[in-house]
Amino acid sequence: MPVAIDVKGLNKSFGDKHVVRDVSITVEAGRVTGFLGPNGSGKTTTMRMLCGLLTPDSGEGTCLGLDILKETGEIKRRTGYMTQRFSLYDDLTIEENLLFVARVYGMDDRRRRVAEALAGLGLEARRKQPAGALSGGWKQRLALAAAVMHEPRLLLLDEPTAGVDPKARREFWDQIHELTAKGMTVMVSTHYMDEAERCHDIAYIAYGALIARGTVAELIDRSALVTFKGEGPGADRLAPALLREPGVEMAAPFGAALHVSGPDRALLERAISRHRGDGLRWTEGRPTIEDVFIHLMRGAEDNFR
């Protein structure tokens, strides 16, 4: 597969905060890569370095075959970037916002391009509606239309679905996969585990360092976590007691059931053995990607503390 992003040893500090530490990442073209990590982990800073909005303190590499240090202007022209917060003009209509973006990019035949963008994302009926009057889901569609109207080869999405309803999130992801089917490469940061599972592969960053890379299945397999599900009367209320047991990293209620995970099978089985009987039953299951990320966080060093 051709490579869209190939960077090595990226570093960025703001004052005494080393926000991104020696991050190296390769992203194949035409794929959706999820970029995950806790708040303040360096996701936004890394994405801005990739598209030329920030200059790394050190490091090297290419984005779309262009040098991230020397050819930032061309990278920006070939990249779409959707920020965390809605950044278009509230007092302009949907159509006026897109016309403005078309002028910024110096696009020709702007009216036709805007009409195609409106049709492609189902915005035609609302074209005269002020952006400030839109709901979160419709603002998201408008921001995506503005980010892809100039037909970028790379699309960077920074927590694009925060605060929108499940239906809007699903429609958004359908649109993302339609774009990648046409050859676009997408990197998307998210906190939602179900969205991580919609990505072709994942990069996980914690406190500035890239600590995991691969598909969801690969990350689960490499974690070597053991997981049991407890069901029965009062199972969901056992979490506090189990979390005090050696070997139990996670104990979380899921409805009336309890999800318990840890890396040491013997210790985990010993912990749950004290809570058998009285109608309680335990079955082993496959860890979730959320289990894996919590496990990774336990081993990560918070360099901002």
Image: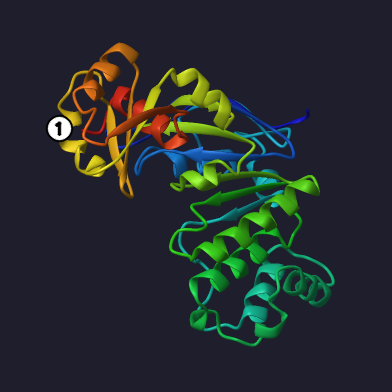
Residue 10 lies left or right of residue 154; in this view the side is: left
Residue 164 x, y percent position in the rendering: 48, 65
Query: Along the line of sight, which residue is nearer the eye, 248 or 26?
Result: 248
Question: Is residue 276 something one can see in this rendering?
Answer: yes
Residue 64 x, y percent position in the rendering: 72, 37
Reply above or below: 175 against 31.
below
- Which picture quadrant has residue 108? bottom right
- Which picture quadrant has residue 131? bottom right
Residue 227 x, y percent position in the rendering: 38, 26
- Which picture quadrant has residue 267? top left
Question: Is residue 189 something one can see in this rendering?
Answer: no
Disc 1 target residue: 241
Reply above or below: 82 against 219.
below
Residue 143 lies left or right of residue 83; in this view the side is: right
Reply above or below: 143 against 193.
below
Query: Along the line of sight, which residue is nearer the eye, 292 or 157?
Result: 292
x 28%, y 19%: residue: 268
x 51%, y 62%: residue: 166
Tell me which amino acid carries mark 1.
Ala
Query: Along the line of sight, which residue is nearer the eye, 32 or 225?
Result: 225
In what quadrant of the picture does the C terminus appear?
top left
Of all residues, the one furthest to the front in this rendering is 278
